[in-house]
Image (tube, rainbow, N blue to C red):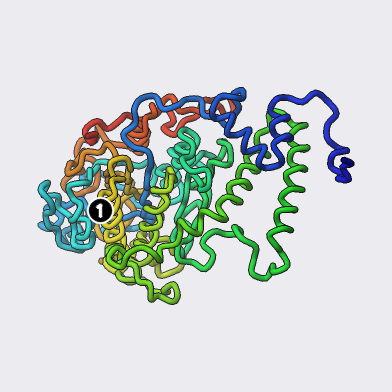
Amino acid sequence: MKNDSPFHRVAPLRPQSRREFLQQSGGGLGGLALASLLSRTGALAANPQTPNARPHFPAKAKRVVQLFMAGAASHVDLFDFKPELVKRDGQASDFGESVEAFQNGLGPWKKPVWDFKPYGQSGKMLSDAVADLGHVADELAFIHNLVGKTGVHSQATFLQATGFNLPGFPGMGSWVSYGLGTENENLPTFVVLPDHRGLASNGTKNWDAAFLPQQHSGTVIYPGMETPIADLFPHKKGDFVTRDSEAAGHAVMARLNQVHAASRAGDDRLESRIRSYELAARMQLAAPEALDISKEPDYLLRAYGINNSRKEWPKEINAEEEADIFGRKCLVARRLLERGVRFVQIWSGNDNGFPRRNWDSHEDIERDHGPLARGMARGASALIQDLKQRGLLDDTIILWTTEFGRMPSTQGGKGRDHNPFVFTNWLCGGGIKGGVTHGESDQWGYKPLNRNAPTTCYDIHATMLHLLGIHHEQLTFRHNGIDRRLTDVHGEVIKEVLA
């Protein structure tokens, strides 16, 4: 049969490689999908899209949720109880050394804004602002001697999100996607749920794949918004787009992409883009179902703090609205995890307006941390309990982090300045020993008690990869002549928090 398509006339007239044959004989994007599948099962030669190592030992966990409090949550007001601050409240602060503050936050010692109480069999002291986490206190492993490298938001956020304090490096979720691949071909491996009020410092660079193949970048989803995934479906004004015309457009683009890729062996950028387009097409069916929480039972929605009567996003935050916002993201995260998504990153507290309504509480800890902390605690507690009830917590790691802490002294009477010298993270879930604490801060919560043995983000990342069955020194990618890895040249597994 005569082929009237003009595209066959520009196909390269040369012997085809096996990969090209599969691409062209498989029919457009489907052929590339087949080639990708065969590549992962070893039928094709290794290529730059394939990780250089499979899991190195049996994994305790399959997936990760990272809860990122952007702006710097105050450890001394939420998790790290310091009786000395209560005793010395209002007295002139004396750190015993010269301190370079980010702003002018070296006022008097300031006691925790909220009272602390013990929770669980472990007796973990938690502030009233995060009291809902008391329900799961014995599931959590706290690290109170974490140190950063800088008090600058952008650099510190990069450090926690990518392992480097400079741009140009893959996000943690990108490394997990690259190392382990997907469990569901119809959904992204790495999903990001930002704060609806705005992006954190560095914006999308926090979850970009950088020099890794671009299909490992985070896919941004806004649960509860009218359009949770941008550009997944034609705009409502594009009523002239039909199913058939869209399919025909995809077919033309597939053929053009084949021709382009065939003449550029070794350049994986187009293949990464094609994989992204393939995934977008499959997501048109899978994503709406995964994001639909309407069939979740009322008791579960209440547990997460979700208010389905909300008509619009609030301009001013309060505890109930914040619980709805954060809880909705946590519930969607659970639905994504049980459908095979590897890594879900949930962001909280991004508001670039003024006065600040985020975790960067220079002016008023109680005003800003209060609603955010209560909403976070309710959503996180519900997520942990929900995962546990479904048998998913045993192989899901939950990591709570922020870019640095806040000073134990006051700034302007009600706020606190940046403290990169010590802060808190907590973990729970797959392979983590609950109800324990690793490392201590000093009597003020200013620096680690043992300044010679702090914990770093590299140790957190190494521990997370270890639980996923990956040796952090062996998951590498050759870039600019260097074998790059998430933990740079650092990192030790924190054995004290392993179950």
Dot 1 surroundings within 10 Å: few (below 14), some, or many (20 or more)? some
Query: For the point 37% across and 53% down, which residue is it?
Result: 334
Query: For the point 22% across and 43% down, which residue is it?
Result: 141
Residue 477 is situated, as x and y percent measured from the top left of the image, at 52, 28
**Amino acid residing under circle 1:** Gln
Q: Which residue is mark 1?
A: 385
Give the camera-side residue of 381 and 183: 183
Give the camera-side residue of 491 and 102: 491
Residue 81 is situated, as x and y percent measured from the top left of the image, at 16, 52
Query: Is 35 placed above or below 434 here?
Result: above
**Quadrant of the drawing holding the C terminus:** top left
Q: Is residue 415 visible?
A: no
Q: Is residue 86 left or right of residue 407?
A: left
Query: For the point 55% across and 36% down, which residue is it?
Result: 212
Element carrying mark 1: helix
Farthest front residue in view:
1
Query: Is 62 placed above or below 103 here?
Result: above
Residue 382 is situated, as x and y percent measured from the top left of the image, at 27, 57
Answer with the quarter of the image where residue 464 lies: top left
Give the camera-side residue of 36 and 418: 36
Residue 486 is situated, as x and y percent measured from the top left of the image, at 44, 34
Q: Is residue 262 visible?
A: yes
Give the camera-side residue of 473 and 406: 473
**Quadrant of the drawing holding the N terminus:** top right
